[in-house]
């Protein structure tokens, strides 16, 4: 593969009244950009939605687990290989050899006094694949001395697709880290927003007939917005980690990023929507976020915010291409008004085209 290959994803999506991602006070998250208040959905929130989509799209072994219960998972894997093994002890020794510390939180210690058994957990969430669990379990039951180098190699082998895409940070031992092959920006509205409040009441079904009062009163803060969402994949780095699985992983990420929706307050607002426009490029120079198209908040017209946002995105992309970048290696688009940037097509066609392009580029390595 060539030295650097990047895939940039640009998505415009109108979300109706909703509270997709809220802060510690329950308010929808916002940001100031271009001197105007924008609706915001954090990158972590949307990456979680993508990982949830992976659960439905990819085989189980291709999806990682972010958990403190690594000791329990490894214990089960050891017992599956040797039911007579002292699995808990072997699991603890293998993790210790790899440089992963375990501890018991206060709640588990309290349970331990009652049950004479406690579960050991990692101090922080640990991102691990089934392949890594299996590799460490094989070492644990091999009967050989558990060496740090071998145990760490097991924890770096066979990364799941989402570990390769989103990376892994291990405070206990940075040598177990994975650099993320994908970056996801905070989604922001292309225009100014003002949060609103929904005042609601709930009726007590068992209240006396002469009681006309509500059983509960409350408010929910919400907004609606046309969001600009951006993500980029360092395909070269992804191929280094996943090898032949790279085209499938790229396709899965693009589809999940386009189709996914964070689930915050979704039962209240049913904001199950899909994008209005998508622009995907393959570049061999650098990734480029096109959020500058909306530094000046767009104004709604007869086409609402969507038409104005599409026009702003197209104009900004063409300007950057002319002034700084040059044309991308490949470009694909979905949605009305995107024709000046690339041939438009349905999602299935775009996914096929990008997957084929990644296979072709990989074959040039």
Image (tube, rainbow, N blue to C red):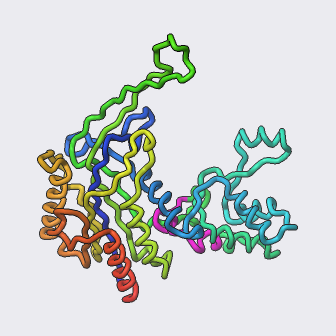
User: Please, which residue is most extreme toward the top here?
Assistant: 210
- Identify the residue at horizontal 29%, vertical 74% (top origin): 282
Q: Is residue 332 shown to the viewer in this render?
A: yes
Give the side of residue 93 with respect to residue 214, left or right. Answer: right
What residue span does the magenta drawing correspond to? 153-169
Q: Is residue 94 left or right of residue 179?
A: right
Q: 328 or 311, which lies in front? A: 311
Q: Nearer the viewer, residue 21 or 295?
A: 21
Question: In which quadrant of the rendered image does the C terminus lie?
Answer: bottom left
Residue at (36% x, 77% y) in the render: 352
Instruction: From the top left corner, tell me how far across and down residue 60 is, in percent.
Output: 58, 67
Picture layout, residue 242 above or below residue 47: below
Q: Of 259 and 37, which appears nearest the observer?
A: 259
Left or right of 13: which side holds 343?
Answer: left
Q: Picture quarter containing residue 259?
A: bottom left
Residue located 77% across and 70% down the image = 140
């Amino acid at each position: 593969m060539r030295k650097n290959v990047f895939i940039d994803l640009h998505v415009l999506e109108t979300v109706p009244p909703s509270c997709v991602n809220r802060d510690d006070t329950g308010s929808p998250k916002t940001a100031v950009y271009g001197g105007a208040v924008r609706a915001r959905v954090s990158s972590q929130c949307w990456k979680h939605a993508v990982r949830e989509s992976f659960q439905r799209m990819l085989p189980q072994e291709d999806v990682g687990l972010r958990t403190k219960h690594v000791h329990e998972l490894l214990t089960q894997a050891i017992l599956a290989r040797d039911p007579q093994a002292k699995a808990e002890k072997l699991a603890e020794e293998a993790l210790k050899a790899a440089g992963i510390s375990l501890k018991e939180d206060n709640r588990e210690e309290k349970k331990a006094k009652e049950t004479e058994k406690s579960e050991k957990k990692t101090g922080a969430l640990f991102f691990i694949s089934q392949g890594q669990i299996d590799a460490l379990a094989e070492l644990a039951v091999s009967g050989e001395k558990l060496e740090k180098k071998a145990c760490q190699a097991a924890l770096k082998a066979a990364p799941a697709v989402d570990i390769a895409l989103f990376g892994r940070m291990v405070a206990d031992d940075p040598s177990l880290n994975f650099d993320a092959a994908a970056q996801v920006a905070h989604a922001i509205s292309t225009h100014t927003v003002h949060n609103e409040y929904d005042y609601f009441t709930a009726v007590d079904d068992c209240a006396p007939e002469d009681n006309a009062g509500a059983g509960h009163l409350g408010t929910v803060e919400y907004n609606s917005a046309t969001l600009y969402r951006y993500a980029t994949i360092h395909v070269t780095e992804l191929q280094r980690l996943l090898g032949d699985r790279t085209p499938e992983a790229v396709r899965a990420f693009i589809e999940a990023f386009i189709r996914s929706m964070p689930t915050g307050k979704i039962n209240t607002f049913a904001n199950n929507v899909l994008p209005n426009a998508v622009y995907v490029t393959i570049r061999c120079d650098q990734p480029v976020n096109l959020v500058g198209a909306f530094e000046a908040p767009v104004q709604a017209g007869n086409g609402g915010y969507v038409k104005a946002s599409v026009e702003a995105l197209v104009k900004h992309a063409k300007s950057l291409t002319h002034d700084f970048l040059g044309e991308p290696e490949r470009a694909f688009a979905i949605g009305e008004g995107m024709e000046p940037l690339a041939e438009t097509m349905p999602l299935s066609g775009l996914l096929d085209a990008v997957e084929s392009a990644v296979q072709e580029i990989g074959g040039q390595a």
